[in-house]
Structures are given as C-alpha cells and as structure tokens.
Image (cartoon, rainbow, N blue to C red):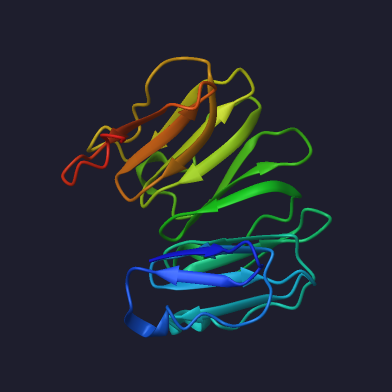
Amino acid sequence: IQCSVQQDGTLGCWGYTGYGIQNEPTGLFADVSVGQQHACGLRPSGVVQCWGYNAYSLHSEPTGPFEQIESGYNNSCAIDALGAVTCWGQTSYSAHIAPSDAFDQVSLGYALGCGIQSADQGLQCWGYSGLGLHTEPTGTFVDVATGYSHACAINTAGSLECWGNNANGQATPPSGSDYVDVSAGEYHSCAIRTDGLSVCWGKDNYGQTTPL
C-alpha cells in the first residue's frame, strides 16, 4: 500500500485494498506514513488519525499535538514539538515503549524502532534486540531507516552504515560519502546520492535492488 498527501492537502492511497486501508479519511493532512496494513496521517493541527488494520490497538491514537508521524509493521510513533516520542500498537519486545530522550527522527521496523537523538545526533534503538539490532553504530547521523530486521543510517560525513540481519546483504551498504537519503524495505535498502542517482542493495527477488 502507498499513500501520499496530494497538492490540495487531501490523502490518496493505492495498492493493497485489504482492511479498508484505501478508505482514507477525508479532510486536510500535513503528513502520512504507511505500515504493513495500516496507515496514520497527521493533520495540520497536529492530530493523528489512523485507518486500516486495527489489531494491537493501532487505531488508539495518542492525544497530540505532534509534528512527525511514523508507521511500522504493527506499530506507529509520533514526535511532538519537544522531540518526545509516543508509540502505540504491538507490544512484543516492548516495541511500544520509546526511550524518554528527545529525537529528531524515528523509523520503525518489525517490533523495532530506531531514532536520531536530538542531544547528540547519535542513534538509539528499542524493541526487538536480536540479530545485533541494538548494536547501533556510534557517531553522529542525519538520517535513519529501519527494515524488517535491519537498519541503515547516513552519518554526518555522508556515508552509509547498516546493522542487524545481513542474510541477504541488506546490512552491507555500498561505499561512498555522498548519500543524502536512505530507505529500508523488508530485506533490502536504497539510498539517494547528492547527484540524485539511487543505489540499492540486499534481496533482489523482484528486482528491488535494480533502480530504474
């Protein structure tokens, strides 16, 4: 499933149709994030609204206002103006209990969250700790992305660092120091370079590591 905020501020969703996930709410939104079978949007007022799959209390949105929204497999998290993170959904591995630190950004995988801390731009993960997922690289970072069981981040030098499950090479990123954005899928990841070109690595059973 994919959803986006359209130019007029309303939502549009396409792809998977189960659990009513294409019955997106009406009205204006500032941001939207899609999980496995649910999605959550952030209204201009900072109010969160979720739809689609509703196990794990995924529609039990916290009271805002919030400034960022992120959805994972069966979890969602929101960040308020002070950087405080509130999560809800699946409780396995305490994935719904975010650290008390302030964060600039968070990303969610399967029962796993990782974020960039506001105080020192370092990484911190919570939830599932197997496969070395809590052995985050040290240093300062500008972007982080969490897949099903791996995570990748861009450090302030522009290089990629990944950790966690590497069964399909998804935690072995390409070299270079010219990356500006990274995104993690289930068993693969992609990043964008400063020249606008994309590069992907990891599982390639559907051509997902061969960018257009």
Left or right: residue 7 versus residue 183 is: right
Residue 195 visible in the shown view: yes
- Residue 129's place in the image compared with 9, above or below, is above
Residue occupying the point 20% across, 39% down: 204
Left or right: residue 24 versus residue 169 is: right
Residue occupying the point 64% across, 33% down: 142
Residue 172 x %, y %: 34, 27
Residue occupying the point 64% across, 23% down: 156
Name the quarter where the N terminus is drawn.
Answer: bottom left
Residue furthest to the front in view is: 8
Q: Nearer the viewer, residue 164 or 143?
A: 143
- Residue 112's place in the image compared with 44, above or below, is above
- Residue 189's place in the image compared with 147, above or below, is above
Residue furthest to the left in view is: 205
Name the quarter where the C terminus is drawn.
Answer: top left
Q: Nearer the viewer, residue 160 or 91?
A: 160
How many numbered markers are drawn? 0
Left or right: residue 190 versus residue 79 is: left
Q: Which of 135 and 59 is in front in this view?
A: 59
Residue 90 visible in the shown view: no
Residue 115 x %, y %: 61, 46
Residue furthest to the top in view is: 176
Residue 166 x %, y %: 29, 36
Residue occupying the point 61% across, 50% down: 106
